[in-house]
Amino acid sequence: MSKTYPVVLSVAGSDSSGGAGIQADIKTATALGVYAETAITALTAQNTQGVSGVAVTDPAFVTEQIDRCFEDIPPQAVKIGMVPTPEVAHAIAEALLAHHAENIVLDPVMVATSGSALSDDDAIGVLARELFGSAAVITPNIPETETLTGREIADAAAMEDAARELAERYGCGVLVKGGHRVEDANDVLAAFTADNEIETVWLAGQRVATDNTHGTGCTLSTAIACGLARGLALEDAVRCAKGYLTGALSSGLALGHGNGPVDHMWEQR
């Protein structure tokens, strides 16, 4: 008897410690019943305490990885994470547009949980110009939102204004993540209606008291992509992804001597 699954392509960097990047994306997709393909943008030498080295993938080889996936097992959704250089950013944008990729979830990763820089600011600029407009949603946290908007995000009202501003500017859904706020883990989603109007909705989140947050951004964006690949509407995909991440944070997994990873397989234990 033949079997098939929804497919997600993760375009991201490899985390040698397994908690973030490609490794987190594969674990997330597997836990959610989705088949994961990958195009690796960089190798990183890192652990829960920081990043000690990055080896950038040749842009032409990033393109080749994406091409081979689309020509054989076309994904229903694409997640984009770490993009280390403008050249890699352009290669990704060009390849995905050539393949008419759908349900793109773009996490504009700039800094790892440990505080180490992962993407060149110019690379995010290339993605913004060439690919944000084709994304279903971008998922910046508060510091990334401040970089994209050029202004401080001091409260919930500023989060909502920024989400709307970015949606208007780029023509895509925008999820501004509130995990950097001390009092809660509420996110705000700005998305276009069928009438091409922008609506905002707040998605309440349970704040989990843990230092083991390595890979949370990667995990959430991939979980959203999995929901879209399974045919969920954007808001429903985000709600399901937040629920999955909350469980992964609440599991109590404790690994490493720094910011440990979340428990991607918590529902299977």
Image (cartoon, rainbow, N blue to C red):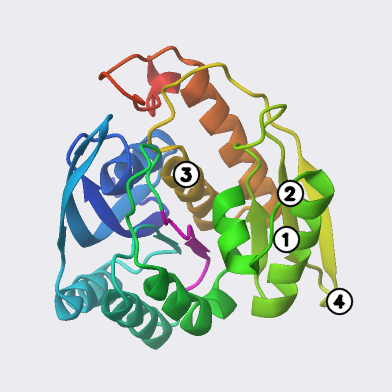
Kind of residue at badge 3: Gly
Circle 1 or circle 4, nearest the eye: 1
- Say the numbered circle drawn on residue 195: 4
Circle 4 or circle 3, nearest the eye: 3
Q: Residue at x 37, y 25 (%)?
A: 265
Please state the extent of the stretch shown in magenta in the rendering: 101-110
User: Quick one: quadrant of the N terminus?
Assistant: top left
Tell me the residue that label 2 is attached to.
188
State how far apart marks 1 and 4 are (Cα): 19 Å
> In this rendering, is residue 11 above or below 91?
above
* Crowd class of label 2 (few under 14; some 14 to 19; many from 20; radius 10 Å): many
Residue 27, quarter of picture: top left
Tell me the residue that label 1 is attached to.
163
Give the SS element for disc 4. loop
The answer to whether the residue labelled 1 contacts the one labelled 2, judged by CB atoms less than 8 Å apart, is: yes
Viewer-nearest residue: 120 or 214: 120
Tell me the residue that label 3 is attached to.
217
Circle 4 or circle 2, nearest the eye: 2
Give the SS element for disc 1. helix
> In this rendering, is residue 246 above or below 11?
above
Label located before the other in sequence (1 or 4): 1
Q: Residue at x 44, y 38 (%)?
A: 32
Label located before the other in sequence (3 or 1): 1
Residue 175, quarter of picture: bottom right
Q: Residue at x 82, y 57 (%)?
A: 200
Label located before the other in sequence (4 or 2): 2
Give the SS element for disc 3. helix
